Amino acid sequence: MSQPLAADSLRGKTALVTGSSRGIGADTVRYFAEAGANVVVNFRNKAPRAHKLAAELRELGVEALVVGADLTDPESVAAMFAEVDKTFGGLDVLVLNASGGMESGLGADYALRLNRDAQLGVLDAALPVLNEGARIVFVTSHQAHFIRTTPTMPEYEPVALSKRAGEDALRERIPALEDKGFGFVVVSGDMIEGTITATLLERANPGAIASRREEAGRLYNVSEFAAEVARAAVEPVPIGNTRLVGDVSSFQAE
């Protein structure tokens, strides 16, 4: 992976990425550690992967805290931030990366509980431990960001609608975040090669990824998209800015 952040540019800072035991979250948290940040690796049910990743990151000379939490459980989230506060005394970057809704057996309302309600819950729980000038990043997809004007695959529509609901709910908090001196940005990407979501979509709709790749010209892979998320966490942009990653010509703006 190429390094999107300057060496030591985050030395002395602390970053937490939700859902960072694998995929985009894991690569994002690695980029932060490579830039010198102490990091919090969050997982829901992939403890071995999370601890393995943390061990690798500690070899970079940073502290890495591993915290398991079910983001749909307020008590679990509160315990996570209590541990963050105890270990680091504050947080400079919060990346709201964890999402889902295509998994089976989790209930019809799971997508909305995770992609909207849990995002707000994590933000609210984090506020007391955010340091001055902290940045919050919400990770979404073009299929969700543009869902009001551009239809998506039926298999993904419930997830897209719930993620857009989460983005809207978070944006309503912008005035309060600005009053506290915090930053907030959204990173939206096209389908990302190699993610769990892409795999599940391909199972539900064979050929979907290849079709989108042909339409877009190319799709970003996990490490490329994670690099854009990492940059969004540090580059100076207006609060509420949206970083659009990949082709957007197929999507109609609101």
Image (cartoon, rainbow, N blue to C red):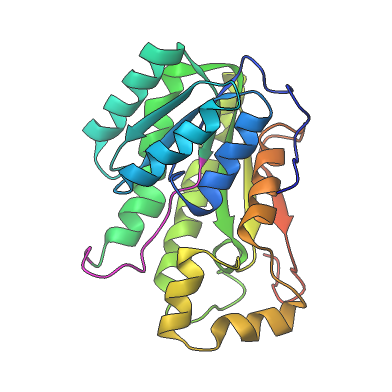
On screen, residue 220 versus residue 195, left or right, reads: right
Question: Going by the image, does 114 lie left or right of 176?
Answer: left
Q: Is residue 141 above or below residue 178?
A: below
The reply to whether residue 63 is in sight is yes
Side of 216 relative to 109 (left or right): right
**Which is more toward the observer, 198 or 33?**
33
Q: Is the residue 14 above or below the residue 67 in the image? A: above
The x and y percentages for residue 74 are 25, 35
Residue at 60% x, 65% y is: 192
Is-magenta flag for residue 97?
yes
Q: Is residue 154 visible?
A: no
Figure quadrant of residue 72: top left
- Quarter occupied by residue 219: bottom right
Front-most of 249 and 27?
A: 27
The structure residue drawn at horizontal position 42% and vertical position 17%, both measured from the top left corner, is 128
Start-end of magenta stretch? 96-107
Q: Position of residue 241 (x, y in %)?
A: 70, 43
Q: Which residue is drawn at the image coordinates 45% and 65% (left, top)?
A: 196
